[in-house]
Image: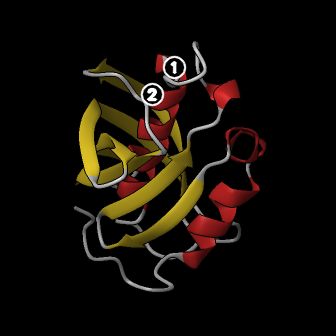
Amino acid sequence: MLPDLVPGYRADLAKAIAAMPASRLIGLRVLGFAPGVSVIELPIRPELTFDGYTVQGGIAGSLADYAAVSAAIVAKPDGWLGSTVNFQVHNLDRASGEKLVAIGRCVGSGSWTGLGSAEVYAVDGDKHTLVVMATAGCQYIKPAGKG
């Protein structure tokens, strides 16, 4: 199910995501990156749900946002970051199980903006259910000192 990832690819971005207070609050974990691809997971905990089992839609959408935007960012060289400027989320099924896994893909990357898509799967044992589809646009942020 997971795309091939490149060990250590864009470690700077993985570190930046892990350092974000919102990432820590909900428990995001970057599984890795490859050119134009990101994989991020979210263990399901009762406090992220609306009923003790099903992740609230906005939180599942946030995971999709992280995956889509980070996939667009990995199209840029090391040190570049990005900030979401828009996103659209489609909740398709119940986001319940052991964890959610988001696979982001870069749709397009320009000089200053990028667009990514994401699929979020609910994982319960060997079962993977597509629960969210999303797109997200970002504005790129140059590394400090890069003019």
Type of amino acid at the residue the image marks with label 1: Gly
For the residue pair 111 and 99, the one nearer the viewer reads as 99
Left or right of residue 30: residue 106: left
Figure quadrant of residue 17: bottom right
Q: Position of residue 116 (x, y in %)?
A: 30, 45
Q: Secondary structure at mark 1?
A: helix
Residue that appears at 45% across and 74% down: 77
Frontmost residue, 36 versus 118: 118
- Residue projecting furthest to the front: 125
The amino acid pointed to by label 2 is Gly
Please give the name of the residue rendered at 48% of the width and 67% of the height, measured from the top-left corner. 31
Q: Residue at x 49, y 52 (%)?
A: 41
Pointer 1 residue: 58
Q: Residue furthest bottom?
A: 7
Q: Are marks 2 and 1 in contact (CB under 8 Å)?
A: yes
Q: Which residue is mark 2?
A: 61
Q: Nearer the viewer, residue 34 or 24?
A: 24
Disc sitting over residue 41 in the figure: none
**What residue do we see at 22% from left, 61% from top?**
1
Decide which of 124, 72 is in the foreground and name it: 124
Tell me the distance, in whole angstroms, between the alpha carbons under discs 2 and 1: 5 Å
Q: Position of residue 103 (x, y in %)?
A: 32, 52
Considering the numbered disc 2 on the image, is that residue within a helix, a strand or a loop? helix
